[in-house]
Each structure stands twice: as structure tokens, then as C-alpha cells.
Image: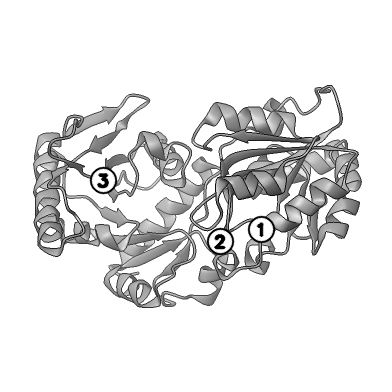
């Protein structure tokens, strides 16, 4: 381990709402390695109940939560400016209460939280980029102001989109159910289940998914997640995906027990993503979750970069249409019975476990701190 780091991350979700998200698992992996971490939640407006300014995470005492208070009306420019000042002052007060040294790293996700970089001016400024950035001007501004860009997108990393000297690949973390704990060997009544989880909306190819459920009658389908998004209504999703051998479970993937239950029930994981600009830059954690559980995967060819590490893996089937997906299902079910195939799938997920990603984070940050630049 490197010398313990003090890390401040200005998040975009409340900590509990962040359960199972990348930063939540990464922070716990770093805390387990002896680092001191402070997670700044989105501010709570005055007039609404709020927790204490500073409080520990019960499961990880090395992680502290900070919740600033602000005025309502964040999107009005003068109020937004005042609130940024309130949040900076709250963080300084929290730091004094904690008695911590100046942080080694101040990390932000969104441009709206970038002002946190300037609370501690000697800290390494890290932009944690997750996937597609729709506004190229915003991306350019963030990359220019950051010392290091840690991206989860293999495509952004390959393109060095934020500059050769700054772009670093730090993947999503995956600590979902392992194959040894998944109960995959248990026989469930009825036909074998294949399925996917997440948000059933613009990123998924819902037409393909609907055609697949109608064409493949020898298996059951289990779909769990949020039915609909800003582009597709819930009723439209239910209409496309409903059927006598389709089970729909509406539940957010922040429910770890629900995710584990889902992974125990299915025999094959589906990644039915559309070939969109967003998905070209994405690195879906569902793919890693299926691999970690030792489940064969049938996926569309949504992103050459994201699939590069897994495309030739036994048990991973890249398909182009509903007919290919339908033919792949019985082959994938058979592959899932082979202990060697299951072992190869779980092995492929090992580099993405939180403990391993924490080690990689240490290496990247230590290198930047040592050289004094990204």
C-alpha cells in the first residue's frame, strides 16, 4: 500500500442512495486499505430535515459523510453562486471539526461540483468521468481544470479524449455475487430463466428484447429494474415486454438483496443495448455482474471498446439480431453447466473487484502526486 491518502469526493448522490454505485464500493475498498475518506453529499436546502454536518459511515469508520446546507433555488445564478460559497464554507468547517490534514486528492464527478477543487488549492484535482459526456465544451472545461481524469470508459481511455497526459482508465467496480455464492447449481422449477436488470429505457434495445421474448418459448425471461425513463414511458415498456413467460420486477438496483436474488435465479445474462453514441462510451456494470456470478452472457455489439476484454471469452456470445440471440440461448445454457467456462467467466471479473480497483486508484494517484502533474 502507498502512504495513506486523505481523499475528498464531492458526490452527486446521497450516500445511501449511492449504494452499489461505483464510488460507494471504491471508497469502501480504499478505506479497507487504510485511507481516510470524506464524501460530500449534495446539499440539503434550509427548511428541510437534514443530518448532522459531519457523521461517520457506520460500516466504514474511515469514511466520513459531510452534508452542507444551502438556500433553495440552486438553478438561479445569484443563488447558485451564494450556495457554492455556503458549501465551500461548510466543507472548511467540517475539515476543522475532523482535524484532518489538507486532502491529497479532491475528486468531483459533475461540472456543478467543480468549485470544490478550489477549497483546497494544493490538492490533486481529479475528475471522475464515468461514461459519455454529451456536452463537448463542458468536457473540455473539466479536462482543462483537472490534474487527472479517471474514466470508466475504455473508449475514452483508448482515444485519450481528455489529453494523453491526463486520461487514465479506472474501471467500474463489481462486488456482486460470486459464482461460489450464487447458488447457480440449484434447480428452479419451470423453464430456465434468462434476463437482464437496470433501466429499461433509451439505452436498451427494447424492440429486440420484445422480439426475443416472443420468439424463444423454451425459456422464461426475468427483467428487473426501472420500467421507463425520460424517453420511454413505463406503460410503453410494459406493453413491449409483457408476456406469459416474462416476469417483470420493478425495483431499483440499489437494493443489493434484490440484485443477489436476481443473479441466483437466472441462468444466462442479457446485455441488450442499442448501438448509440452513449453506449459506445459506456461500460455497463451489469456485464461485470453477470461474469462475476459465473453466468454466460448474450450481448449486442454495443461498444467494441467495452467488449474488447470479453469478446473471445467462452460463455460470452456477441449477437447482431434477435435470430442470433435466440440461437445463442440454448448454447449459453449448456455453457453455464461447464465448470471450466464458469471459472473463466468469474476470472475475467476479478480485476474489477473493489479491492483491485482500489489498488489501481492508489497507483494512478501516487504517480500523479509524485510527478507533480498528471
Q: Is residue 141 left or right of residue 220?
A: left
The residue located at (53%, 30%) in the rendering is: 256
Q: Split into 4 quadrants, where in the image is the C terminus?
A: bottom left
Q: Which disc, if any, is residue 273? A: 1
Q: Which residue is mark 2?
A: 282
Q: Secondary structure at mark 1?
A: loop
Q: Secondary structure at mark 3?
A: loop
Q: Which of the two labelled residues, at mark 3 and mark 1, occupies the earlier sequence position?
A: 3
Q: Is residue 338 above or below residue 280?
A: above
The residue located at (66%, 62%) in the rendering is: 274
**Of labels 1 and 2, the one closer to you:** 1
In which quarter of the view is residue 176 placed? Answer: top right
Q: Which of the two labelled residues, at mark 1 and mark 2, occupies the earlier sequence position?
A: 1
Can residue 234 be seen at all in this image of the molecule? yes
* Crowd around label 3: few <14 · some 14–19 · many ≥20 (10 Å): some
Q: Which disc, if any, is residue 173? A: none
Q: Secondary structure at mark 2?
A: loop
Q: Which residue is mark 3?
A: 42
Q: Which of the two labelled residues, at mark 3 and mark 2, occupies the earlier sequence position?
A: 3
Q: What is the CA distance from the residue labelled 3 to the residue labelled 1?
A: 30 Å
Amino acid at each position: 500500500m502507498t502512504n495513506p491518502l486523505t481523499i475528498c469526493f464531492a458526490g452527486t448522490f446521497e450516500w445511501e442512495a449511492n449504494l452499489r454505485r461505483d464510488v460507494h464500493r471504491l471508497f469502501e475498498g480504499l478505506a479497507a486499505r487504510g485511507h481516510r475518506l470524506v464524501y460530500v453529499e449534495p446539499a440539503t436546502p434550509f427548511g428541510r430535515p437534514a443530518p448532522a454536518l459531519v457523521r461517520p459511515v457506520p460500516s466504514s469508520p474511515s469514511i466520513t459523510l459531510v452534508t452542507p446546507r444551502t438556500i433553495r433555488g440552486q438553478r438561479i445564478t445569484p443563488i447558485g453562486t451564494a450556495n457554492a460559497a455556503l458549501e465551500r464554507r461548510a466543507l472548511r468547517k467540517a475539515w476543522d471539526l475532523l482535524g484532518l490534514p489538507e486532502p491529497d486528492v479532491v475528486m468531483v464527478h459533475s461540472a456543478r461540483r467543480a468549485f470544490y477543487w478550489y477549497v483546497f488549492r494544493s490538492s490533486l484535482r481529479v475528475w471522475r468521468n464515468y461514461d459519455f459526456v454529451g456536452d463537448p465544451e463542458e468536457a473540455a472545461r473539466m479536462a482543462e481544470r483537472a490534474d487527472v481524469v479517471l474514466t470508466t470508459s475504455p473508449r475514452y481511455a483508448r482515444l485519450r479524449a481528455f489529453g494523453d497526459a491526463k486520461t487514465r482508465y479506472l474501471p467500474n467496480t463489481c462486488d456482486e455475487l460470486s459464482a461460489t455464492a450464487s447458488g447457480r447449481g440449484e434447480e428452479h422449477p419451470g423453464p430456465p430463466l434468462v434476463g437482464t436488470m437496470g433501466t429499461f429505457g433509451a439505452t436498451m434495445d427494447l424492440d429486440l428484447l420484445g422480439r426475443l421474448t416472443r420468439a424463444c418459448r423454451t425459456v422464461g425471461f426475468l427483467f428487473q429494474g426501472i420500467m421507463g425513463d425520460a424517453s420511454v414511458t413505463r406503460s410503453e415498456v410494459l406493453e413491449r415486454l409483457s408476456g406469459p413467460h416474462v416476469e417483470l420486477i420493478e425495483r431499483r438496483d440499489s437494493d443489493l438483496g434484490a440484485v443477489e436474488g436476481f443473479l441466483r435465479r437466472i441462468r444466462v445474462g442479457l446485455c441488450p443495448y442499442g448501438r448509440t453514441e452513449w453506449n459506445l462510451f459506456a461500460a455497463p456494470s451489469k456485464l461485470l455482474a453477470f461474469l462475476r456470478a459465473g453466468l454466460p452472457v448474450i450481448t449486442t455489439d454495443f461498444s467494441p471498446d467495452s467488449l474488447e476484454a470479453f469478446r473471445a471469452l467462452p460463455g460470452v456470445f456477441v449477437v447482431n439480431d434477435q435470430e442470433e440471440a435466440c440461437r445463442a440461448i440454448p448454447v449459453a445454457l449448456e455453457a453455464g453447466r461447464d465448470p471450466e467456462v464458469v471459472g473463466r467467466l468469474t476470472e475475467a471479473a476479478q480485476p474489477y473487484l473493489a479491492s483491485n480497483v482500489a489498488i489501481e486508484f492508489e497507483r494512478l494517484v501516487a504517480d500523479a502526486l509524485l510527478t507533480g502533474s498528471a
